[in-house]
């Protein structure tokens, strides 16, 4: 297959770009090797093409958000979730302390909405431990293998989590959260600290692209209706305040994370993941964005392109 050669060539083309910087508000992430570079593409029949550091583990961070949102929709229903988290792009950075004029977080891709979505995983009244088990089991089903937490990154982020704690206290004050806000931030931060590889992320994206069925295990992870909702929100909000640039230039439903991961899920076609830790000012991977721009152009992947 010519695909691995093509992927290796595209990696080489972006390799010299060392602009951007690793996330420094999480001490453990600031210490990550910034030169890591990987791409993995998973097709819907379960083939994975992986090049570069595609079996190196890193923390999923905000790429967990669409998957946790999918679990919340599954467990609480659309109305139960929409009651507490909107679907409007905010145009704000991911860590903005903000609520819309109905007192809800704008969307589940920014931290306020993601902390809320985390709290909506599991049955009403479930405690933090069982909820976290459900989060791990759910994200593991998306990946097709058991995922585990990087305890060092979790502990590191909790030492500097003042902003997320302030968001959670605000959510509690407005009645969006009805339980201990500190425990919810801990659960959300553990969710962000799950370890994945680029190959895992490509398969997780491919499960979304494959209407909720894992292309290798054959398991139905979430319903088609849930996938449609999640991919819609990824399209409008997945790249935060760079969402407009992304959707016009790349045109693939996507989600980034501050450890340097980036996924794209093209419905009915493919799941793609890249890994490169240096971030731009929006917190999106610099080389990841460049790789996706190339894929979109070279392979005609923009969702608005007529085949
Ligand atoms: N855990 C990170 C945070 O809440 C995730 C942010 C991200 O990946 N954009 O700040």
Image: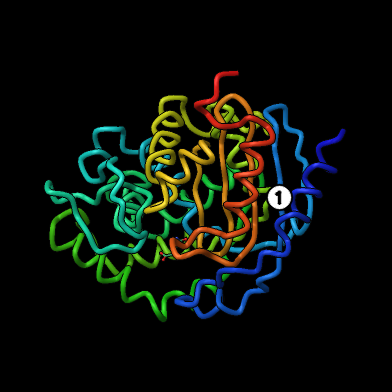
Measured as percent of width and height from the top left, residue 84 is found at 22, 45
Q: Quadrant of the N terminus?
A: top right
Which residue matches tag 1? 39
Report whether 304 appears left or right of 69: right
Measured as percent of width and height from the top left, residue 304 is found at 50, 26
Rendering colour mode: rainbow
Report whether 249 appears left or right of 105: right
In this view, 116 is above or below 67? below
Report whether 110 appears left or right of 224: left
In the image, 186 versus 31, the foreground residue is 31
At a point 45% along the width and 35% down the height, the residue shown is 231
In the image, 285 versus 213, the foreground residue is 285
Any part of residue 67 in sight: no
Quadrant of the image occupied by residue 203: top right
Measured as percent of width and height from the top left, residue 42 is found at 70, 37
In this view, 38 is above or below 190? above
Q: Quadrant of ligand 1?
A: bottom left
At a point 34% along the width and 49% down the height, the residue shown is 117
In this view, 294 is above or below 96? above
């Amino acid at each position: 297959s010519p695909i691995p050669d093509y992927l290796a060539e595209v990696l080489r083309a972006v390799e010299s770009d060392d602009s951007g910087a690793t996330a420094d508000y999480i001490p453990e992430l600031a210490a990550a090797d910034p030169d890591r570079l990987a791409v993995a593409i998973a097709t819907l029949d379960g083939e994975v093409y992986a090049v570069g550091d595609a079996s190196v583990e890193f923390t999923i961070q905000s790429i967990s958000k669409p998957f946790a949102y999918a679990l919340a929709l599954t467990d609480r229903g659309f109305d139960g979730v929409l009651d507490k988290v909107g679907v409007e792009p905010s145009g704000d950075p991911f860590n903005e302390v903000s609520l819309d004029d109905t007192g809800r977080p704008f969307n589940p891709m920014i931290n306020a909405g993601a902390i809320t979505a985390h709290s909506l995983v599991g049955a009403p009244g479930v405690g933090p431990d069982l909820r976290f088990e459900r989060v791990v089991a759910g994200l593991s089903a998306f990946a097709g293998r058991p995922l585990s937490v990087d305890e060092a990154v979790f502990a590191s982020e909790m030492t500097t989590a003042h902003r997320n704690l302030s968001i959670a206290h605000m959510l509690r004050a407005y009645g969006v959260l009805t339980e201990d806000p500190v425990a919810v931030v801990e659960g959300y931060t553990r969710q962000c600290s799950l370890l994945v590889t680029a190959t895992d992320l490509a398969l997780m994206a491919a499960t979304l692209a494959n209407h909720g069925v894992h292309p290798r295990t054959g398991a139905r992870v979430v319903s088609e209706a849930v996938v449609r909702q999640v991919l819609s929100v990824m399209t409008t909000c997945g790249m935060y305040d760079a969402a407009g640039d992304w959707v016009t230039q790349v045109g693939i439903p996507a989600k980034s994370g501050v450890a340097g991961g980036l996924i794209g899920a093209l419905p009915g076609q493919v799941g793609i993941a890249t890994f490169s830790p240096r971030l731009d000012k929006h917190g999106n991977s610099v080389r990841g964005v460049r790789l996706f721009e190339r894929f979109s152009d070279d392979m005609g992947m923009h969702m608005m392109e007529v085949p």
